[in-house]
Image (cartoon, helix red, strand yellow):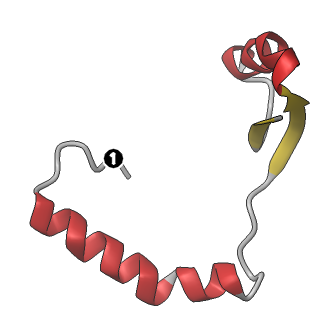
Amino acid sequence: AGLRNRTTENKSVIVSEVEKNVWPAIEAGKVKPVIYKVFPLSEAAEAHRILESSTHIGKILLVR
């Protein structure tokens, strides 16, 4: 959900609800991100190419 155009009060409610209802599942390992591929920072251009092609499903991570 985009938060940029929401009021500060609404953002606070959303953060509170996520902390209460979602974060415990993440901490328990019940919710995990789908990671498509991990790239070293030196291969950032390739990571961006894949990202822009929209051929991936999941997150593309850059690591040092």
Q: Position of residue 14 (x, y in %)?
A: 30, 71
The quadrant in which residue 9 appears is bottom left
The answer to whether 13 appears left or right of 46 in the picture is left
Residue at the (83%, 35%) spot, across then down:
64
In the displayed structure image, the side of residue 18 where residue 56 appears, left or right? right
**At x 47% / y 87%, what residue is drawn?**
21
> Residue 23's spot in the image, x, y percent?
55, 81
Q: Position of residue 15 (x, y in %)?
A: 34, 72
The amino acid at mark 1 is: Gly
Q: Residue furthest front?
A: 64
Residue 60 found in image quarter: top right
Residue 7, quarter of picture: bottom left
Q: Residue 57 location in percent, x, y?
A: 78, 39
Residue at 17% in and 43% down: 5
SS at badge 1: loop
Is 62 positioned to the left or the right of 6 in the image? right
In this figure, which residue is indicated by the disc labeled 1? 2
Image side of residue 38 versus residue 44, left or right: right
